[in-house]
Image (cartoon, helix red, strand yellow):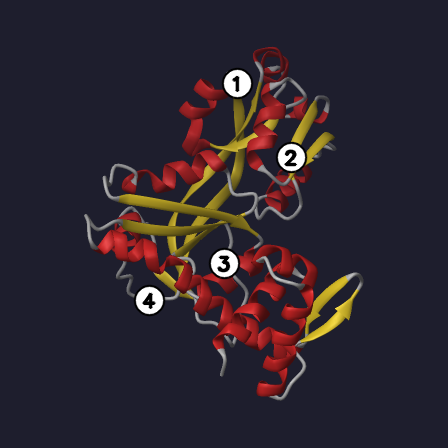
Amino acid sequence: MNYNHLHYFWVVATEGSMSRAAERLGVAVQTISSQVRALERSLGAALFRPEGRGLALTPAGQAAWRQADEMFRLGERLPELVREADGEPILRLAVGLVDGLPKLLVHALLTPILNEPRLRLQCLEDRPEALLAALALHRLDLVLTDRLPGPNPNLKVYAHRLGSSGLSWWGTPNWAERARDRFPHSLGELPVLLPSPHAAVRMQVDRWFASHGLRPQVVGEFQDSALLKTFGASGLGLFPAVDRVQDDLRQRYGVERIGALDDVQEEFFALSTERVVHHPLVKRLMQPATGPETAA
């Protein structure tokens, strides 16, 4: 196999079109096209199909891209790895964050490793399925999430429980004063901000309202927890947040605690492809875990 052809194919697949790949590589589109066709002849399969103004991978192309992507991403890291080997070793930790996971909580969960002088931390936020795919390809060392993944016969994932936290209602001083009067029934009369339905805790919050016979005045729903707190701190409405980060909420956002969402708990897990974790930083993160790992 001509690996130059494979590299051209990888760039086209990454960029989504031959014109963008040609611009990135500084060559003519015709050169890109001929290299990709040569690779297709070598493999005996079509790797691309037209889609809109660009190209999409065929099933054969997807299989080829997964292998090529791992190869060339490792190749891109080679100079850096050589430089590191020639100096003081660096402890890398690549962490995937399920979108919607509270950012203040992520910082709290990662605190045990942040004083490591040789640390190089990489954080990627994405959808759960995208993070699991990256974990399977060993681009991530672990994934932090608030829910257990569904069964997947093609991927063995172990969930290590990191703990849980209750939730409370928060708001600016003016809203907090009004909300404390007749709490929790006041939550049915005042504007509230909620995590979007994709968040694992949202269903519990909805049940909390139902258990108290309340119909909330929802003025905003946010996929990003930091945005939810930012708009809450601006006075748009009351919002729920995990109790584990109370001090940070007060200091960073200037908000006040109103009352607890009784019986609502948000759980947190670290997902890995190993039952017994060997990465030294991941092992350090697992030390405060309050429960055993679960195969998912």
Quote the CA–CA distance across marks 3 and 2: 22 Å
The answer to whether one can see residue 261 in this image is yes
Residue shown at 27% from the left, 57% from the top: 82
**Are the residues tagged 2 and 4 within 8 Å (C-beta)?**
no
Image quadrant in which you'd find residue 207: top right
The disc at residue 148 is 3
Label 4 CA crowd tier, 10 Å (few <14, some 14–19, many 20+): some
Amino acid at dot 1: Val
Residue 182 horizontal/vertical position (percent) = 63, 18
**Are the residues tagged 1 and 3 within 8 Å (C-beta)?**
no
Label 3 CA crowd tier, 10 Å (few <14, some 14–19, many 20+): many
Residue 136 horizontal/vertical position (percent) = 45, 67
Q: Which residue is denoted by mark 2 in the rendering? A: 194
**Are the residues tagged 3 and 2 within 8 Å (C-beta)?**
no
Quote the CA–CA distance across marks 2 and 4: 35 Å
* Residue 275 vs residue 125, the one in the foreground: 125
**Are the residues tagged 2 and 1 within 8 Å (C-beta)?**
no
Quote the CA–CA distance across marks 1 and 3: 31 Å
* Residue 121 vs residue 106, the one in the foreground: 121
Foreground mark, 2 or 4, reads 4
Amino acid at dot 3: Leu
Q: Which residue is denoted by mark 4 in the rendering? A: 275
Residue 156 horizontal/vertical position (percent) = 44, 71
Sequence order check, earlier mark of 1 and 3:
3
Q: Secondary structure at mark 1?
A: loop
* Residue 91 vs residue 291, the one in the foreground: 91
The answer to whether one can see residue 17 in this image is no
Amino acid at dot 2: Leu
